[in-house]
Structures are given as structure tokens and as C-alpha cells.
Image (cartoon, grey):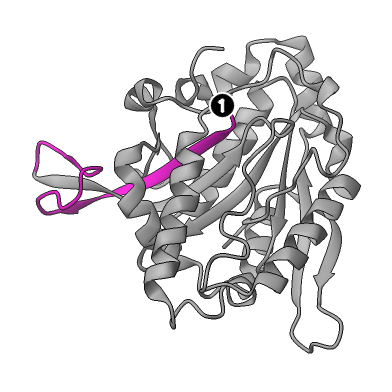
Amino acid sequence: MQAATKPAWAAAGVSKTATTTTTTTAPTAAAAAAATTSHGNSDLRLRAATAADLDDIVRIVKAGFPDDPEWDYRYPYRDEYPEDYDYWMRREYGDYLAQTDKFAVVVATLPELAAASSPSEQIGECGTRDVPVAVAVWDVAVTKDSRGDLGIGERKDANTVHMLALLHAFTAAARRYFSRHWERQYHLWALVTHPDYRRRGAGTALVRWGTRAAREKGGWAASVIASSPAGKRLYAYCGFEELGEVVVQIEGEEEKCVVWCMDWVLPKVEEEEEEVNGDWMEKKLGNTDRFLPDT
């Protein structure tokens, strides 16, 4: 399921003057070492991704996104140009990892019995390895400029006209639906689980990591542009509400891409309880700051 949607906040007219010194930054490698937590599935772990995870992240992305309708709309020639496809996926997700002041890249891992086959796999005492099975890319500083879609007009695996249409449509949608939150939101750019590990709670845990982090910022919102019916259902399950539907279609073409703008806001009852008891959120949910560096 792909959030894959890059709201270009500056281009959308969202004022940078609204940015405050409280903007959270994404995890550094040092913070990542300590950023581990468990969720519903007792074997599932979330941790901040590092550069060593890039191979696993690309593997997950290439396996998990092709059944997303938007993927075919963006990259219809990926099977014809597999080397180009792999190169640009590495560039894109390497770029997320490198922009540590803007993105929190979080991986979900599950243990497997085997010797490590990649640098990111951690071997446990019982001979198990923690294998990344899902990844989320959260924009934790939405008013900061990003480098946007990489390779528009260069990559052979993509439909350039469709990529530009998606970029323009998502920019307009971000301005219409998400600018009311200003910088006080985390935006989910990408969420994907490897098909072999779906329905084990990884996607839900990665979404709820973002809503927890938004809560702990003092009632921030979370936003996403869902590009698949399955993703839409997951976000609704996690408390997101649909704000509007966006149809992307080039004039004269039958092919189109339909996405849904959704956001999550702190429920009023929780907001009131948090105002009365300032440490309530930390006691109930734990603290997500271990995923983020000091600011």
C-alpha cells in the first residue's frame, strides 16, 4: 500500500513562516541504534532504518508495490527496464534515508531462523535474524523543502506524463486538504509490506507509530494520500477519515488513477484528558522520541 504521494508544500503555497523551532527531525544513525520497540505481534519490532537497510527496503518496495494501482500508472515500463527501475528505487529511498532533517524512515522486522544475509539483519542469541518486512516513510517536517520525485524525464521505467500529472494533482490536494494543519502534522509518504508478511500487523504498527508520534507532539495531525482500496481500509481502521477523492486522468486517455486524501486528528476526549494530565500520553503509549534525535 502506497502513500507515495509527495505534497510539495512550498509549491502548494503553504507558508514556511509557520515553521517553528519545535519541528521534529528524523532519526540519525545513533538514534536508530536505540530505537526499537515491540507491537501487538510479540515477534514484531519497529526500529529506525539506517543506510544498511537500503537493500532490504528496495526488496520490500519492489515486491510490495506492484499490486498498488498507482504503481502501474507511474511505472508501466518497469519490466522492460529492470535496471533503470532498480536504480531509481535505490536513489529514491536512499534519498529518504539521507534527508535526516525531514524524514523518519521506520522498518518493521520479524525474526527468522538463519544466518544473516544482509548487513541490516541482526542475529539473536538463538540463531534468529531480524529481517525487515515492511517500511514506512513519514515526513516529520512538512514545511521543509524536499527534493521531490527523482528522475522525472530521465527514467525509462516511468510514464513521465503520468508522473507529472500525479505530482500536480497531489500538490493541489495537499493544499486543499492538509494545509489547515500547517506544520503541525506528520505526512505518510510511503507504506509497504512485503507480500510474504502481510496480515501480521506490520502495516498497522507502522501507521500507529506515526499517530502516536503526532499525539506526543502535543495533538498534531497525521495525513496520507491513499492510493489503493486496501490502504484506504487500513488507514480508516487506524482512525483516519476521508477528506476527498482525487481522480488523475490525462485528457483523451481511458486510464486513470484514483486516490483518497485522509487525515487523523487527536480525538476530542483524548485531547481533553491530555490537557488535564500532561504525562498521560507517555504513561499510556510510551515515548516515540527514541526514534528521533535531539533538536
Where does the image place residue 207, in percent across and percent down from the top left? 58, 45
Left or right, 289 with respect to 17, comes to left
Left or right, 154 with respect to 46, comes to right
Position above or below: 56 against 218:
below
Left or right, 186 with respect to 130, comes to right
Residue 286 visible in the shown view = no
Residue nearer the viewer, 228 or 96: 96
Residue for point 64% across, 71% down: 70
Position above or below: 294 against 31:
above
- The verdict on residue 116 being magenta is yes
- Which residue is labeled 1 in the image? 101
Left or right, 114 with respect to 49, comes to left
Looking at the image, the residue that sits furthest to the front is 154
Disc 1 residue type (three-letter): Asp
Span colored in magenta: 101-126
Where does the image place residue 19, in percent across and percent down from the top left? 77, 21
Q: Quadrant of residue 142?
A: top right
Residue for point 86% across, 39% down: 179
Q: Quadrant of the N terminus?
A: bottom right
- Under circle 1, the secondary element is loop
